[in-house]
Image (spheres, grey):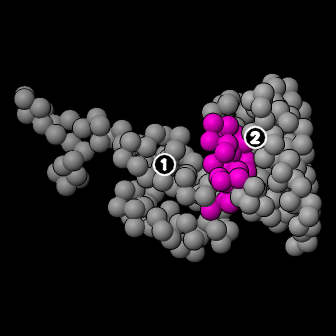
Amino acid sequence: MRKGCSKFFCEDERQFERWNHTAIKSLKAEFKRFKDVVVLSLMHPWERDARLLKKALKKGPMQYNVIVEIACIRSSDELLGARKAYHSLFDRSIEEDLASHIQGSERKLLVALVSAYRYEGPKVKEDTARLEAKAVLNAIKNNDKRNAMEDDEVVRILTTRSKPHLKEVYEQYKKFSDKTITEDLEVELLLKETVECLCTPQTYFTRVFDAALRDDADEDAKKALTRLVATQESEEMKGVATKFEGKIKERVKGAYKDVLVGMLEK
C-alpha cells in the first residue's frame, strides 16, 4: 500500500521510508470534511440547525453569518423547529443565549432574526414596499453616518416582513439609488449578508462556493461549503451548484468529492 500511494510516503537521505507530512495533513482534513458533510446530512434538520447556532455563538463574531444564514434562509416552520430543538438540547432558548453573549446593534438584529415567524404567502403591497425602500435608503445614506444596523426601521423591516415583500423592497430600492442595497452595504457585512440571504440567496450561495473553491481558501470557507451543501435543497442553491460543479470535481478530492457531488446532483 505504501508503494502504491507514493505521494503519501517518501524516502529520506538515509533511505528511511516515512510519510509525507503535508500529504497526510491534507488527507486528514479531507476525511474530516467527509465526516462533517455526512453527519450534517443525516442529522434531523432541527437538531442540526440548533447545534450549528450554538457552535456559531461560541465561535464569536466571525461566525455570526451562520446565525444569519439559518435565520434568513430557512422557512418559518424550519426556524421554529430549530428553536424548539435548541430548548431540548441546551435547556435554554437561542434568544436568551444570543442576548446574553452579543452586545450592541448586532444583538438587536440577530435576536430579532431568530425570533421571526414570517408570513410566507405571495401577497405583497407595492406601495408599502416602496415606502420601506425609501426608509432603508435614508438609513444607509444618513448624514451622520450612523450604522444602518442601529436604525430601528431597518431592523423592523428585515426581521418582520415576508421574503416576497423584502424582494420587492430590494427592487424598489434600485429605483431610488444607483446601486442595490447590498452594494450600498459593502462595509456593513453582517447586514449585507442578511439582505442577501433574504432577498438574493443565490448571491450568498455564489460567494460561499467561490470562497471555498479558491486555491488559497481557508478552513472556515471550506466548512461553509460543507454546511451549505448538507443543509440547502432550494432551487437557487441547485442553480448555483450547477455552475460550480466542474470546479468542485477539479479542486475537491476523494470520498469527500464523491459525497459532495452526489448530494448536489440529487
Asked if the stretch drawn in magenta spans residue 190, the answer is yes
68 w.r.t. 98: above or below: below
Counting from the top left corner in percent of width and height, residue 186 is at 62, 42
Name which of mark 2 and mark 1 comes first in the sequence. Answer: 2
Q: Main secondary structure of the magenta part?
A: helix
| Quadrant assignment for the C terminus | bottom right
Where is mark 2, residue-wise?
140
Counting from the top left corner in percent of width and height, residue 173 is at 76, 56
Where is mark 1, residue-wise?
211
Q: Dot 2 lies on which element?
A: helix
For the point 50% across and 71% down, which residue is it? Answer: 242
Tell me: 43 left or right of 98. left
Tell me: 245 left or right of 67. left
Q: How many C-alpha atoms fall within 10 Å of the one at disc 1: few (<14), some, or many (≥20)?
A: some
Q: Dot 1 lies on which element?
A: helix
Q: Amino acid at mark 2?
A: Ile
**Magenta segment, which residues?**
177-202
For the point 86% across and 30% down, which residue is it? Answer: 99
Q: Amino acid at mark 1?
A: Ala
Q: How many C-alpha atoms fall within 10 Å of the one at disc 2: few (<14), some, or many (≥20)?
A: many
237 w.r.t. 134: above or below: below
Tell me: 106 left or right of 12. right
Asked if the stretch drawn in magenta spans residue 7, the answer is no
